[in-house]
Amino acid sequence: MTEQPFSELVPEGVIGFPVTPFHGDYCLNSEGFRDNLEFMLEEPFTAFVAAGGTGEMYSLARDVYINLVADAVEVAGDRLPVIAGVGYGSRIAVTMAAKAAGAGASALLVLPPYYPNAAFEGLLAYCKTIGNATNLPLIIYTRDWVNLTASQAEQLAEEVTTLAAWKDGQGELRNYQRIQARLGDRFTWLGGVGDDLVGGYYGIGIRRFTSSISSIAPKLSILLHETGAASDTAALEKLTKEHVLPLYNLRARRKGYEVSAMKALLELAGKAGGPVRPPLVDPRPEEIDELKAILDGWAQANLL
C-alpha cells in the first residue's frame, strides 16, 4: 500500500472519465485527448481515469494504451492524479499495471477479467496478481458479471493488501450498503454506475463518484456533487430529472451507448470524440438529434 491513504490521494468530489477520441480511421486522436483533458481541468475534478470503460480500454493496443496514460499524466501534471484502467487476463493486466506505473499513474482501476462468470477464487487470484505487480493502490470495479457479497468483499480486503477503493458498477444500493457496513473505512467508496445515481449514492454516505458526463458538461458533474454533498435533495432531483435522465434514458437503449453517446456529444460541441471501435456502435441519425437537444439544454443552463 502506498504511504498516502487513497482518501487523501483522491479527495471527496468527482472523478473524471474522459473518452478516448479516435480519428475517422479509428486511430488515436492524441491531440484531441489532451485538449479534452485541458477543458476538463478548468473544473475542480479530483482525478482522471485514463483508459477506463468509457475510454474503451478493451479496444486499445498496448502501445496506444501506454501513450494514452502517459498523455494523461503529462497533461494533469501535479494538478491531480491519473488512474489507469487495467484488465483482460492476469498476465496482460500485470503488464498494463507495470507500464502504467512507469508512466506515472497514481492508482489502478481493475476492470473484470475477460472470462465472464469465473469462480470467486479466480477473481481473487486475478486481483492479487495485479496487486503484487506494483505498489499502486487498486480500485476494484464491480461491473458486468462481478457482483460480490459482503463476505467476498471482506476476503478481498484481507488478501489483496493494495486494494484501496471500491467502485460500484452494479447500482444495487442495498448490497453496496451491506458491503460498506461490513468493511467501514477499509475502502474508499466510489459511486460508479452513472451520474444518474448520485442521489442514491450520496444518500448512503458516499461522497465520490465517477462521471462520464464530465467529459462534455464538467460543470454539471461538479454541480451534481455539490448539491448531493449539501443534501439539497430538491435541487439534486431537479438537476437529475432535467439534465441527466434524458441522456441516461438514451444510453440505455443499446449496449455501448454509454460510450458512443458521449463521443457524439463531444463531436456536436466541436470537441474530439470520433467514432467508437467495433463491436460498439455509434448512435443512429435520429438519436443524434436527441443528443443535440440535450446538449442545447446543458448550454442554456450554463452546465458545459
Image (cartoon, rainbow, N blue to C red):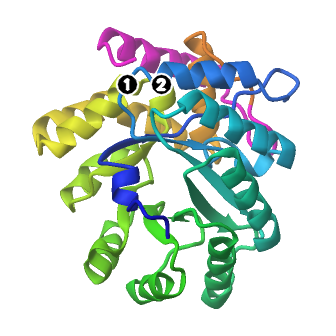
Dots 2 and 1: beta carbons under 8 Å? yes
Along the line of sight, the residue nearer the viewer: 158 or 197: 158
Q: Quadrant of residue 49?
A: top right
Give the residue at x 57% y 34%. Answer: 18
Position of 215 relative to 85 (above/below): above
Span shown in magenta: 276-304
The residue identified by callout 1 is 43
Q: Indicate the secondary structure of the residue bearing disc 1.
A: loop
Callout 2: 10 Å neighbours few (<14), some, many (20+)?
many
Residue 41 locus on image (x, y percent) = 46, 25
Q: Is residue 88 shown to the viewer in this render?
A: no
Q: Is residue 179 shown to the viewer in this render?
A: yes
- Residue 40, labelled with which disc? 2
Residue 129 locus on image (x, y percent) = 69, 78
Along the line of sight, the residue nearer the viewer: 105 or 216: 105
Residue 80 locus on image (x, y percent) = 46, 38
Q: How many marks?
A: 2
Q: Quadrant of residue 20?
A: top right
Q: Amino acid at mark 1?
A: Glu
Give the residue at x 62% y 73%. Answer: 131
Give the residue at x 34% y 57%. Answer: 7
